[in-house]
Image (spheres, helix red, strand yellow):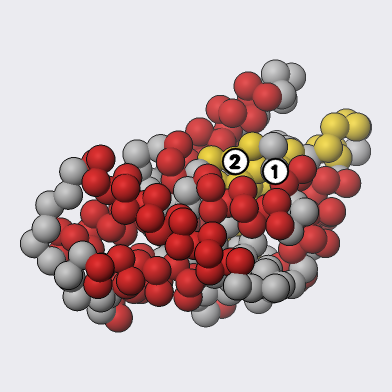
């Protein structure tokens, strides 16, 4: 088995913007005459799509919202997100991101194969937010395949986003014949890790949002920082056909 594709999460892996999202969600709840999030609700929202979060938060407060109104709320939040980012001169991207992307783009599927590893993004954030950040950070060219929260009706920890990414990569690169087991996901939350695992992918947990020891329980590899990930070692382990790791190896 070879490693053929690396799939990044967005919030908490590419950009450190969770505080902005939590603030904007609270603002919308207050605008709707509802109580802001409790501590446990904030924790539960990490790694899940905005749609899923709003559905749960409104249900917790005894409000039922239609899909149409929920979409309007998401657009309101996205517009507010754009305004918040405009206030920030330098985006809070995680250190080591560009170096890791370079590693992925420069490495071949195998020593015998000249094809480069493919790179994609799977997130519960809506596409407008993702594209804004990638454009400002000059990273858009690296992510031809993006699965955003508005592409699917489910949220992590369901595997649908990752499975759709595999489908789109195969559509984009017909010769790839990509299988989920040939993908490496990079995640920062238990919900995201669980989604990738349910899609039959190997997972790197980066301790940006949760402690190292907590992610280590669920991931095949765990790192403190993106710069700690040794992609060459990961590729070597993927090449071992009977590789079935259950603990951190990086």
Could you tell me residue 61's position as x and y percent?
13, 66
Secondary structure, mark 1, is loop
Position in image of residue 186 (x %, y %): 61, 57
Callout 2 touching callout 1 (CB < 8 Å)? yes
Instruction: Look at mark 2 in the image and give the residue it sits on.
Output: 146
Relative placement, left or right, of 183 versus 156 is right
Helix, strand or loop status at disc 2: strand
Q: What x and y, as percent, mark residue 60?
A: 15, 65
Residue at x-position 71% and y-position 72%:
90
The tag on residue 47 is: none
Q: Nearer the viewer, residue 120 or 34?
A: 34
Please indicate whether residue 49 sits to the left or right of residue 241 in the image: left
- Say which quarter of the image contains residue 59: bottom left
Disc number placed over residue 143 in the picture, else none:
1
Give coordinates of residue 230: x percent, y percent. Answer: 79, 62
Quadrant the C terminus occupies: bottom right
Residue 249 in sight in this render: yes
The answer, for residue 239, to whether it is visible in the render is no
């Amino acid at each position: 088995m070879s490693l053929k594709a690396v799939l990044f999460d967005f919030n908490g892996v590419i950009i450190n913007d969770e505080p902005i999202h939590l603030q904007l969600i609270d603002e919308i709840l207050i605008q709707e005459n509802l109580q802001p999030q409790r501590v446990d609700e904030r924790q539960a929202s990490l790694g899940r799509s905005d749609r899923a979060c709003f559905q749960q938060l409104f249900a917790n407060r005894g409000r039922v919202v239609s899909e149409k109104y929920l979409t309007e709320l998401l657009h309101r939040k996205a517009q507010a997100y754009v305004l918040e980012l405009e206030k920030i001169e330098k985006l809070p991207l995680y250190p080591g991101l560009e170096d890791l992307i370079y590693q992925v783009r420069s490495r071949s599927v195998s020593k015998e194969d000249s094809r480069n590893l493919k790179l994609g993004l799977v997130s519960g954030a809506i596409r407008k937010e993702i594209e804004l950040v990638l454009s400002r950070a000059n990273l858009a060219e690296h992510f031809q395949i993006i699965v955003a929260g508005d592409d699917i009706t489910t949220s992590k920890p369901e595997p649908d986003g990752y499975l759709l990414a595999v489908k789109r990569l195969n559509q984009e690169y017909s010769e790839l014949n990509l299988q989920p087991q040939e993908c490496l996901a990079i995640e920062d939350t238990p919900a995201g890790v669980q989604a990738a695992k349910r899609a039959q992918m190997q997972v790197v947990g980066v301790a940006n949002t949760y402690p190292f020891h907590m992610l280590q329980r669920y991931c095949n590899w765990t790192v403190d920082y993106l710069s700690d990930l040794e992609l060459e070692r990961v590729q070597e382990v993927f090449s071992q056909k009977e590789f079935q790791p259950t603990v951190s190896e990086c």
